[in-house]
């Protein structure tokens, strides 16, 4: 998993509440267990018309938001089914951070385990950040995870809370497998000992 330390990037405003995981990545695109290639299906029903052409009114189809790395939305982002493909699709598109007043718990957990930082900020602050984002590529936000600050284009710093363990994992690029591999020596020692104690288990 790619570590998340400091991110300065374009933020896309998505002034919607209750953005569920089916909107993020529709069920018909869940036929793969690969984490790549899903970005093209992100927000498919909103990004594309029925004939497959792009919807020019949707924010991620507009320059400069095609290169957005931060998404700003409203309440209950990521609600609905527990599909992990939702953060996979966001990440494959290039989104590394989502800012909203709150998140569905399972989406929040899946996001952090895949290197996406979900930041909870009050509705009024999200609205202000959306106004910043509407200025386009000339108004980039900075996310400083170590200091737990969102820095507006004006230089104003907005603090945010993050669970200490999740922060540690994101800063060090540790997903569940990475955390386990930190104990690789102890695992190897255990397996060597068990081979000696019960060789029939390894025959």
Image (tube, rainbow, N blue to C red):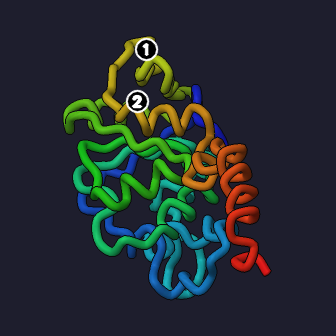
Q: Which residue is more in the foreground, 165 or 117?
A: 165
Residue 107 in the image: above or below residue 174: below
* Circle 1/circle 2 CB separation < 8 Å: yes
Q: Nearer the viewer, residue 117 or 29?
A: 117
Residue that extends furthest to the top in the rendered view of this protein:
155
As drawn, is 137 to the left or to the right of 156?
A: right
Can you identify the residue that label 1 sits on? 154
Residue 159 % position (x, y): 33, 20
Where residue 29 appears, x then y in whole percent?
55, 82
Q: Residue at x 53, y 28 (%)?
A: 140
Q: Earlier in the sequence, mark 1 or mark 2?
A: 2
Element assignment for label 1: loop
Q: Residue at x 52, y 75 (%)?
A: 48
Q: Is residue 160 visible in this depiction of the protein?
A: yes
Q: Can the viewer see residue 1? A: no
Displayed quadrant of residue 53: bottom right
> Is 52 rendered above or below residue 178?
below
Q: Find the distance from the CA under tag 1 to the CA under tag 2.
A: 9 Å
For disc 2, the marked residue is 132
Height in image: 200 above or below 97?
below
Q: Position of residue 155 (x, y in %)?
A: 44, 12
User: Which residue is at a point 29% across and 72% down the rendered structure image?
Assistant: 80
């Amino acid at each position: 998993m790619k570590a998340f330390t400091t991110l300065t990037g374009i933020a896309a405003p998505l002034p919607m509440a209750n953005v569920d995981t089916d909107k993020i990545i529709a069920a018909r695109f869940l036929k793969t267990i690969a984490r790549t290639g899903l970005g093209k299906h992100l927000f498919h029903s909103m990004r594309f018309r029925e004939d497959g052409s792009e919807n020019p009114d949707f924010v991620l189809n507009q320059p400069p938001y095609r290169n957005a790395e931060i998404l700003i939305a409203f309440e209950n982002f990521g609600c609905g089914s527990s599909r992990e493909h939702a953060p996979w699709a966001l990440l494959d598109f290039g989104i590394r951070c989502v800012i909203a007043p709150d998140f569905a718990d399972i989406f929040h957990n899946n996001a952090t385990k895949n290197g996406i930082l979900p930041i909870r900020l009050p509705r009024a602050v999200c609205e202000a950040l959306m106004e910043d984002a509407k200025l386009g590529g000339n108004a980039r936000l900075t996310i400083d995870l170590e200091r737990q600050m969102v820095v507006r284009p004006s230089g104003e710093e907005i603090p945010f809370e993050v669970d200490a363990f999740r922060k540690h994992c994101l800063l060090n690029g540790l997903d569940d497998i990475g955390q386990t591999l930190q104990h690789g020596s102890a695992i190897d020692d255990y397996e060597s000992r068990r081979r000696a104690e019960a060789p029939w288990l390894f025959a």
